[in-house]
Structure formats: structure tokens, C-alpha cells
Image (tube, helix red, strand yellow):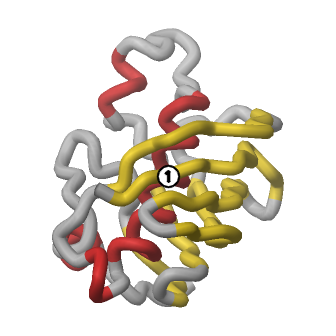
Amino acid sequence: MAVLLDKEQIKEIIPHRDPFLLIDEINELEVGKKVVATKYIKEEDFWFKGHFPEYPVTPGVLMVEMLAQAGAVALLSLPENKGKIGLFGGINNCKFRRQVVPGDILNLEVEIIRVRGPLGIGKGIATVNGEKAVSAEITFAIK
């Protein structure tokens, strides 16, 4: 998949920084509406030191955060949101369907399905090789 935005360009849009910038590239972007991003799951990712040393698996909450960061790129790319921060307002209908381990490439897709003022909802799905890993509706607030 083509790289539309790399990590440095992502940092120009959202305020997250290492070690908590959890997306590596943006592959598609429809500003304010939809985003497709990629996270390369590497053995050296910080969470594997403790989750779990003998059985490395990506924490589900971090995968939801990856979806949220991808969605934030779509929303904070809007000119009126430049320099703002996206905050969680809630997580609904979240389902974990597959473990994500070192070597996996996580494809993150978020569609913004509702916006009312500074609040809204995004529908996110993360997959590995076309197989669902997590899906969730993410409520957000722009501050």
C-alpha cells in the first residue's frame, strides 16, 4: 500500500510522540471522513517487555488507541482543528477477535460516522492479512 504520510508528517497533525505514537504511516486519507493507516508490530515495541515476555501479544487497549490515533489524523487534518487535541469520550461495541504478535502488520481503518460540534463517533476496524483483530466505535472530543 502506498504511503501518503510518514511518521514525521503524522506528527505535524497529531500531538502524540514516541513511545506513544502508535501508527507508522497513513495510506489513505479523506480529511474529516476516513483514514487508513498502518502499524508495523515489531518485537522491540515497548509493551512486549512486560506483555508478556514469554508470550508477546499486543494489548487490546493499545490497538484501540491505534485506531483512535488514526481517526485523530482524519479529524485534526481539518483546517479548523489544526493544533487541537482529540480526546477519548468512550469506547462502544469493542470486540477483540485475533491476537496481534511481533511481525504482524496491522491495517487500521476508521470512518467518521457522526460529528456534532466538538464531539463525534468513529467506527474502526483493525485487521491483519484481512482478518479482523479488533473493531470498535470510538467517541471523541476535540479540544
* In the depicted structure, whether residue 56 falls above or below residue 22: above
What residue is rendered at 54% in x and 47% in y? 103
- Which quarter of the picture shows residue 125? bottom right
The location of residue 15, given as percent across then percent down, is 20, 57
Residue type (three-letter) at the residue carrying disc 1: Phe
The quarter of the image holding the C terminus is bottom left
- Exactly how many numbered labels are in the figure? 1
Q: Which residue is mark 1?
A: 140
- Which quarter of the picture shows residue 5? bottom left
**Disc 1 element:** strand
In the shown orientation, is residue 138 left or right of residue 125? left
What residue is rendered at 79% in x and 39% in y? 93
The location of residue 57, given as percent across then percent down, is 57, 26
The quarter of the image holding the N terminus is bottom right
The location of residue 19, given as percent across then percent down, is 22, 40
The location of residue 35, given as percent across then percent down, is 55, 76
